[in-house]
Amino acid sequence: MNNIRYAAFPDKLARIISVILHPFLMPVYGLLIIFMAPTLYNYLPITVKQLVILIVLINNVMLPLSLMPFFIHNNLIRSWFMNERTDRIIPLIISTILYFVTTYIIFRFTLPNFLKLFFIATAFLSLTATLINFWWKISLHSIGAGAILALVLVLSFKMHTPLLWYLIPSILGGGLILSARLKLNLHNPGQVWAGFLTGSLGFAVIVMLIQKFI
């Protein structure tokens, strides 16, 4: 059914979209939105922005990727793509630990509370995805896409600033990644929509609840 519905969506394009909007990269995109959107956070010193992005690139992109050959060599996962639910368990656990480590590092700096909330929400979404993955193959790409959309909406609400030019790409990007995962037959509609709702609602709820305590 999915093959018929998404026949016009080329497999190669679906793979490219899956790489560009990979879950590892979503926190980086989230930070770029925070730092570039026309809000107070746009005026943070460039050195601060560079430092925060560098921490995430090293701790949550480069380090997890560097561990992949070790996982494959020791038969802990079967491929780089981790298409099977069981292949995702160990990488997800490692990623979740690293997100909490990053959150701890960020809290040691004097940074706006919203940035700290962003990292708390990211860490807890990773933990949620890890726990769900023990029983069910939820779409990690869709969780990331949902979280990005929620980030734009929450940022717009908190800063009382319309972010239409960030909202539209977030919606379009979410639609593209959900379609790509379905086209590649890596998920069914329930898995991608559950991921999208987990990412969007989870991010918004965590931010709203935790903001009272920091």
Image (spheres, rainbow, N blue to C red):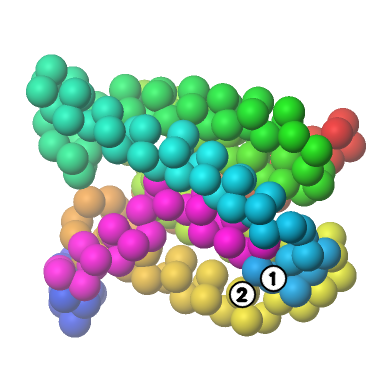
Q: Quadrant of the N terminus?
A: bottom left
> Distance from label 2 to label 1 (Cα)?
8 Å
* 154 relative position to 72: left or right: right
Badge 1 marks a residue whose secondary structure is: loop
Q: In the rendered image, which quarter is residue 94 located in?
A: top left
Badge 2 marks a residue whose secondary structure is: helix
- Circle 2 residue: 166
Spot occupied by residue 192 in the image (x, y as percentages of width and height)? 39, 54
- Dot 1 amino acid type: Ala
- Circle 1 residue: 37
Q: Quadrant of the C terminus?
A: top right
> Is residue 190 among the parts visible in the rendering?
no
Which of 90/73 is in front? 73
Residue appearing at x 69%, y 70% in the figure: 37
Q: Is residue 119 above or below residue 103?
A: below
- Dot 2 amino acid type: Tyr
The answer to which of marks 2 and 1 sits earlier in the sequence is 1
Crowd rating for badge 2 (residues with CA inside 10 Å; few <14, some 14–19, many 20+)? some
Does the magenta run of residues contain 187?
A: no
Mark 2 in CB contact with mark 1 (< 8 angstroms): yes
Crowd rating for badge 1 (residues with CA inside 10 Å; few <14, some 14–19, many 20+)? many
Q: In the rendered image, which quarter is residue 206 located in?
A: top right
> Is residue 52 among the parts visible in the rendering?
yes
Spot occupied by residue 132 in the image (x, y as percentages of width and height)? 44, 30
Q: Main secondary structure of the magenta part?
A: helix
Does the magenta run of residues contain 34?
A: yes
- Nearest to the eye among marks 2 and 1: give it: 1
Residue appearing at x 72%, y 46% in the figure: 115
